[in-house]
Every structure is written in C-alpha cells, then in structure tokens.
Image (spheres, rainbow, N blue to C red):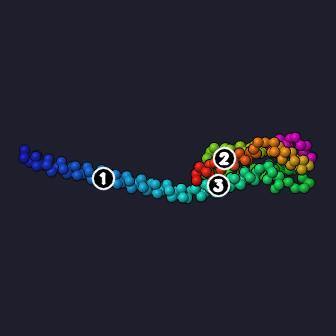
C-alpha cells in the first residue's frame, strides 16, 4: 500500500506538470501560428493593394475612354458618314473592353457588373443614334445626335460606373 501511495505522490504532480506544460506550449504554438498568419495577410495586402488600385485606375480610364464625348473626339474624322462613325465607335468600345477584361479579378463582382452595364448602355446609346440618323448622313449628324442624347441623361452610363469605382476604392483605403 505504501508503494501505491508513493507512486501516486510522484505521478499526480508529474501529470499536473505535464498537463500544464502541454497547455502552455499549445497556447504558445497557437499564438505563433496566428502571428505568422497575420504577417502573411499583411504581406498579401501590401502586395495586392497596389495591384488593385492600378486595376481601378485602368478601369476608370476605360470608362472615361468609352464615354460618348471622348469616343467622338477620338474616332470622328472629317468627312465620315454616319455608318462609318457608328462602326468605328462600336469597334473602339469593344476593343477598349477587351483590353481591360483581365482587371475584373481585382474588383468586386458588383463593380464589374456596373462597368459592364455602362459599356452595354453606351453601346445601346450609340446604336439608338445610328438607328435614328440615316446611314448616309454625315458623321457630324450622328455625333451631334449622340452628344444631345447624353446631355438629356441625368448621368452618362460611364459616370455611374466611375462613381461606383470611387466608392469601392474609398472602402479599401
């Protein structure tokens, strides 16, 4: 009986020390793992944030470049017929869009949808103008009609998307 008592007197404190050491080490390892995870998240943020901001810049430039007045200033040439201008405007919008497709991975799905809607609405506006102006009319007539149509809108489709991008950038800064 004496042996069991001596064994318990040695074993119980040893178990308590072992359990305490295990708990302390586990807590230390958990803290270390959490600290490393936070460092990785911070490093990723340092790397990704500039890339995301660059994507927002590029998409803002895209939206500015496909605004109707900007398109007309870049595409219209003296002597163009309405049909030619219509074709060139659509081609330019699609080309600009294709050039910026990869940027969608850096922005929210909601912002990308607003951007696509702005592109679609700009194309609709151009197509509506082309339907109302005869194909053999001058490009200046189509340009005038498009600019007047934009002035009648509360906001140009691209402006709505630019405002959304600005809000999203403000939220990540």
| Location of mark 2 (residue) | 164
Residue at 55% over, 59% down = 47
Q: Looking at the picture, how far across and down is residue 134, in whole percent?
A: 91, 43
The percent position of residue 42, horizontal first and vertical second, equals 50, 56
Give the residue number, with chain letter if any, for mark 1.
24
Secondary structure at badge 3 equals helix
Q: Does 107 sit left or right of 125 as displayed?
A: left
Q: Secondary structure at mark 1?
A: helix
Reading the image, the residue beneath label 3 is 55
**Count the marks: how many?**
3
Give the magenta-colored segment's residue range: 125-137
Label 2: few (<14), some (14–19) or many (≥20) C-alpha neighbours in 10 Å: some
Q: Earlier in the sequence, mark 3 or mark 2?
A: 3
In the image, residue 163 above or below residue 54:
above
Please tell me whether residue 133 belongs to the stretch shown in magenta: yes
> Residue at position x 86%, y 45% from top?
145
**For marks 1 and 3 on the same chain, the one whose residue lies earlier in the sequence:** 1
x%, y% of residue 86? Answer: 84, 48
């Amino acid at each position: 009986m004496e042996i069991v008592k001596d064994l318990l007197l040695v074993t119980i404190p040893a178990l308590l020390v072992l359990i305490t050491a295990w708990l302390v080490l586990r807590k230390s390892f958990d803290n270390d793992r959490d600290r490393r995870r936070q460092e990785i998240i911070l490093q990723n943020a340092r790397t990704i944030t500039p890339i995301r901001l660059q994507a927002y810049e590029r998409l803002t430039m895209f939206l500015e470049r496909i605004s109707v007045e900007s398109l007309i200033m870049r595409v219209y040439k003296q002597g163009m017929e309405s049909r030619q201008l219509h074709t060139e405007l659509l081609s330019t919008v699609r080309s600009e869009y294709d050039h910026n497709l990869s940027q969608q991975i850096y922005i929210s799905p909601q912002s990308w949808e607003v951007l696509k809607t702005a592109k679609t609405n700009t194309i609709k506006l151009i197509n509506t103008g082309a339907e109302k102006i005869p194909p053999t009319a001058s490009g200046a007539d189509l340009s005038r009609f498009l600019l007047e149509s934009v002035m009648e809108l509360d906001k140009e489709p691209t402006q709505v998307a630019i405002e959304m991008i600005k809000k999203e950038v403000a939220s990540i800064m």
